[in-house]
Amino acid sequence: SRGGCAAWYRDITARYVELFDYYTPEQLRQRGEQRATDGRPKPRTMTEFDRNTIKLVRQGAHLAHCDVLHPMYMYRLFHGFWQSRAAVNAVENFTLFKPLRVESGHLAGRLPDDYVAVRFYFNDVFPDTDTNRRFVAELLNGLAEATDVVLLNPSTELDDHRDVPVTTRGRIHSVAHLMSPRSNLELQSAVVSRARAFVGTHGGLSYLAPLLGVKSLSFYSETRPFTLRHLELARRVFTGGPFGSYVALDVNDLDPLRATHVHALLAAHVPARL
């Protein structure tokens, strides 16, 4: 993987290989853009890039032979559920969800004592529109009135996620200066693990927070069948058990211009730490 996320796989393997040891951030970003251009944003097939990467890793780790468990097997196995042709047990029968543990001691003294971790970026379910930009601005203004905010946005574009531009000011802080391509996901995980809650775009990080035992409040503005299926599964997984709470809301059901609504939303889902 890339970005220093070895802790995510700690219960699977003790050996982690960092792709940024083999490729530049620009090369990996271009690879992701090419997949999207080809109409295959997810790795549903074994590509020449994948074969070359496996070859490089095998050479670097001195592995004469290794079995390959490619993401395409997961996508194929769960395809019926994502396409609304199978029940949720098509996923549940083959999965085991467990909390994640990450180290965050190195951040002591470098973050506010009490804060909410935030990352808003544009994607298929939260596109770049004036309405969404205003919503993020209003939400962050309301959030910063109640608590410190730590932005998780990296300083450089490392993938197909285009971050919503936010200016650091007052109680809105950035940790971009602490990140490098090799450590960006490691750092984001550590920051989220110490947070009161996570607030941001519905997507990957909104699922990471509950796995770290942290409340998650995420937003989307476009609903597609696969989005609803993701929401159905996430709500089942994160209801009860050792996980943080999980709430995902459609911004179209809110009034993004009314600060009172923002404050009520934050009070309901991101209560002050006692």
Image (spheres, rainbow, N blue to C red):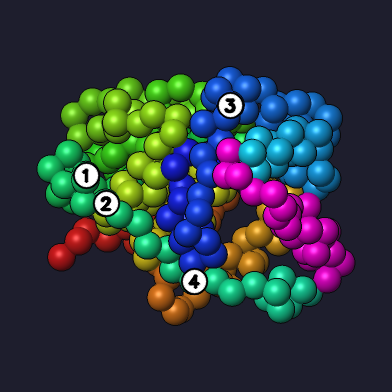
> Mark 3 and 4 residues: CB-CB less than 8 Å, in contact?
no
The residue type indicated by label 1 comes to Leu
- Mark 1 and mark 4: span between their CA atoms? 24 Å
Q: How many marks?
A: 4
The residue type indicated by label 3 comes to Tyr
Q: Residue 81 versus residue 212: which sits nearer the camera? A: 212
Using the image, tell me which numbered label, if any, was put on residue 48.
none
Q: Residue 30 versus residue 136: which sits nearer the camera? A: 30
- Mark 3 and mark 1: span between their CA atoms? 28 Å
Circle 4 sits on which residue?
98
| Between discs 3 and 2, the one toward the N terminus | 3
> Mark 1 and 2 residues: CB-CB less than 8 Å, in contact?
yes
Q: From this view, report whether residue 81 is shown above or below residue 112.
A: below
Left or right for 43, reference 95: right
Left or right for 222, reference 172: right
- Please give the range of residues in magenta: 60-86
Q: From this view, report whether residue 242 is shown above or below residue 125.
A: below
Circle 2 sits on which residue?
104
- Could you classify mark 3 by the number of other residues whose Cα lies within 10 Å: few (under 14), some (14-19), or many (20 or more)? few
Q: Is residue 63 magenta?
A: yes
| Between discs 3 and 4, the one toward the N terminus | 3
- Mark 3 and mark 2: span between their CA atoms? 27 Å
Identify which residue is drawn at 70% across, 41% down: 54
Circle 1 sits on which residue?
107
The residue type indicated by label 4 comes to Lys
| Residue 125 coordinates in the image, percent (x, y) | 64, 42
Disc 1 element: helix
Which image quadrant is residue 145 in? top left
Using the image, tell me which numbered label, if any, was put on residue 23.
3
